[in-house]
Image: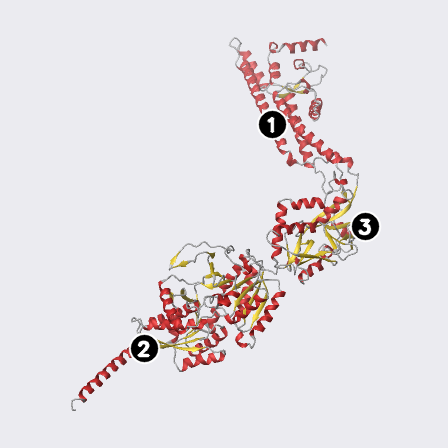
Amino acid sequence: MSSKPFPMLIFILKTCIIISLLTLKAAAKETIEIGAIVDFNSRIGKEQKTAIAIAVENYNHDSRNHKLMYVHFRNTSKDAIQDLFTAEDLVDKNNVKMIVVGMQTWEETALVADIGKRHQVPIISFVTASFTPELVQLKWPFLVQMSSSSLEQINCISAIVRSYQWRRIIIIYEDDMYSDSSMLAVLSETLKGDGAEIEHQVILPQTSSLSDPREVVRREVVKLLRKQSRVFVVLRSSVSTASHLFKEAKEIGLMGRDSAWILADSLADLLDSVDSPFISSIQGALGINNHYAEATKSFQDFKGQFQKIFRSDYSMEDHSEPGIHALKAYDSITAFAKAVNNLGTKSSNDSKLLKNKILSSNFTGLSGQVSFVDGALSHPSTFRIVNVVGKRYKRLGFWSSKVGFSEVVEAENGERIQVNGSHTMKSSEVKWPGELNRVPKGWAMPTDSKPLIIGVPGRTSFEKFVKVKKVANSNERKYSGFCIDLFKVVLKILEQNYTLPYEFEPYDGSYPDLVQQVINRRFDAIVGDMTILAERIKYVEFTQPFAESGLTMVVPVKFDGSEKAWMFLKPFTISMWIVTGSILVYTMLVVWFMEHQSNPEFRGRWKDQLGTAMWFTFSSLFFAHREKIKSNYTKIVVVVWLFLVFVLTSSYTASLTSMLTVPRLEPSVKDINWIKRTNTTVGCDGDSFVKDYLRQVLELQNIKNISNQEDYPKEFESGNIKAAFLEIPYQKVFLREHCNQYVVAGPNYRFGGLAFVFQKGSPLARDVSEAILTLTQDGTLNNLEERWFSLSRNCDNVDASNETESLTLGSFWGLYLVSGATSTVCLLFFVWRLCRKSRQQSQAYYDSVVHPSTNQSFWTKTARIIQYYQNDKPAVSLRRVTSGRVAGLGVDEKGSSSKWHLVSPSDAAQVFDGSSQHPPQSSLEMGNLRSE
């Protein structure tokens, strides 16, 4: 009995030792407590709770960590104030060092962020703030946003809209009182930059606050039937609200053909976890979800852990795969754990230092790169574009701000790969709502039960464009004209892709009022001669113009014969006449200089020589010259000159003939300034914009409305108007019928052209424009114009708008240059040969005088040298010749008085040489003179 207490004592001692060792081991690791406020009842909250628990467990089981982590989970409340108290309680009672906020609204997140600011506790949130990161840091310095800027997703939505050329969209979002208003404003500005706009906004209240959410949602969705746009962007919504939205939209037909739905990440990120009825209600929708790498080992390990725990805790859930919300929750704990480890031996109670360590994180997590700038993730998101098809969805590709749309992601498995980006998405792989095999128009397309209502001008000045005629004994109307026929041809091209049921409806008001009916949505389109104007294009959509447009002034012609007396001068311009005269005189002088040296017909008194040269040159204009040409140089000059004369005379004759045979219509009023000075009355179509343009822009006062094409001639003849202002298409029609009586005067005032009109943002305008371009290229449009606006028989030989223009120097300067250059070159060659011959003769004379034969005496040589220097060196010069010495030059002896004559070097040599040097002809002439 005495020995029994001893073993018991030993057992108690061992137990105490073990407990002491365990206590010491636990005390060796400091426990850090954190809080997590998530929604236990939502899919997102369930994923976040599971992921946080896995992250904490992995951290605690890592022997390298010298601290333990414990998480306090709290469920979110439907009341934001209650969540505020929950966060306050975690800080005060549980002494948490960080709070992970899993709420999905910025309203709740902002309240918890205030608690973090007050107690200096880091708050990690997964909601993107509606403010800039800089402003968030100033207002909530302890808030850490595990999310990128919403601008990336906005740009992605805008890129999709631009890619499919949708012009108007409808935004749908669930109101949380904070974030979506600013996000919506940014989206609106981004869409405007891409040529699109937000037509309507649908603000849905949170279904949790409604007693009958289905009825409220249905009321809002029914309103969309009155809108033309069929492109819907669900910017932000919970799954419960979206379920009601898509169910009602499908029932009223908004999920059918030519509709397009784009789901932002708030819904697209949950497509893996929603039920089958939800998937079936959004068939054909496009989704934008956050991309994350699924092939990495870390993700696969986490996925296995997640699925095991998730299936155990939430056996009612159909899908157990982790989504982006679970990955970000895991990465948030990882960032906190790394910050705690980086503190080392420093106290973890320093919250500010702990927050700074979290913000300095830089690692690759499960959700992507984790690094912060101004309290938010700095790495731009990469979005995956998906298409809801069948029981799940199909992946179409990726989008990022760096490369645009691509088929592969920018980085995978941690390695950089080559990416070929594009600004457009491939549409061939998309399964659109209603099983449409083409890109939806995104517009309320007409049907047989609801056709396109097209307004047609009921009152037109020129009925060849549009004419509405009432059928006798019935309420039906017959529509005809160039515009009507063109529209019907366009429809045949559109029918290759889709049918376009329509109904014409005449409108008897003015053209500006007709455009206003499209703005007011009474008419879907206008088919007629509508002018594209800057103030109209702001509110309606114009097609490609099918006719040029502009304002011209049409006036009666006058037949003025005062200028006919000088009509012969019109074929050439003034500069042409001056240059022609100059080249004629130059050629005349060149011919005279080269011919009078050796050609007797160009010799004599200077008056006779000048007259002969002038007669020869002028007679060559008519090829009537009779003088013979001696010099070869002169012949070259004359040949080129005659070719120039031939071209000039032929051109002159043709131009003058055209001016005399083609009727020349002179305007009675030449410019608009005369109308302003005299305050003359002018006419125009008062139902168009022209009247306002004349008053406001051209500042004309006396304007008379003329409503019919046939009234213009009557008003002109009666003198009521002096000019009429018509748009170019109407002017062409009018002048083709009255080509001999009216002409265009003054400048043209250009406008955008004539086109069809559709409602703003209508895709039909783009399709009709393509059809008009096709008709322009294949010649169909020209054939229609010829059929409707054929030229009158009286106008076949009349050009009412243009005169035969005078010939200018620009067309002949090459011929003038060749003629002048030829004359100059020949003249230079002639002078060079003349000088050369003169030097040869001078040298012969010098040798005979200065170096005579040795048989002569000294006094004879001296006398010859003195005579040489007294008479100068012989050259081509003018010298005085007396009557007694002119016989050798063939000059009449009757000129007894001394005269000056041009003497050639050969003549001069003969005079200074002895009588034995005279040729026989000179001797005969001297004998004849003596006999006389």
Q: From the viewer's perspective, is residue 801 above or below residue 497?
A: above
Residue 534: percent from left, percent from top: 65, 56
Q: Which residue is mark 1?
A: 822
Amino acid at pointer 2: Glu
Direction right: furthest residue: 718
Residue 204: percent from left, percent from top: 56, 71
Task: Identify which residue, 483 or 826, lies in the foreground.
Answer: 483
Q: From the viewer's perspective, is residue 339 above or below residue 260?
A: below
Residue at position x 67%, y 44% from top?
Answer: 783
Q: Which residue is mark 2?
A: 30
Residue at position x 23%, y 83% from top?
Answer: 15
Secondary structure under tag 2 reads: strand
Local packing at callout 3 (Cα closer than 10 Å; few below 14, some 14-19, many 20+) is: some
Q: From the viewer's perspective, is residue 462 above or below residue 107?
A: above
Q: From the viewer's perspective, is residue 241 above or below residue 896?
A: below
Quarter where residue 365 is shown = bottom left
Name which of mark 3 and mark 1 comes first in the sequence.
3
Amino acid at pointer 3: Glu
Secondary structure under tag 1 reads: helix
Q: Which residue is mark 3?
A: 715
Please indicate whether residue 199 sits to the left or right of residue 617 in the image.
left
Secondary structure under tag 3 reads: helix
**Image quadrant in which the N terminus is located:** bottom left
The answer to whether mark 1 and mark 2 are in CB contact below 8 A is no
Amino acid at pointer 1: Thr
The answer to whether mark 3 and mark 2 are in CB contact below 8 A is no
Q: Is residue 653 visible?
A: yes
Task: Identify which residue, 300 or 917, lies in the foreground.
Answer: 300
The answer to whether mark 3 and mark 1 are in CB contact below 8 A is no
Name which of mark 1 and mark 2 comes first in the sequence.
2
Residue 370: percent from left, percent from top: 40, 66
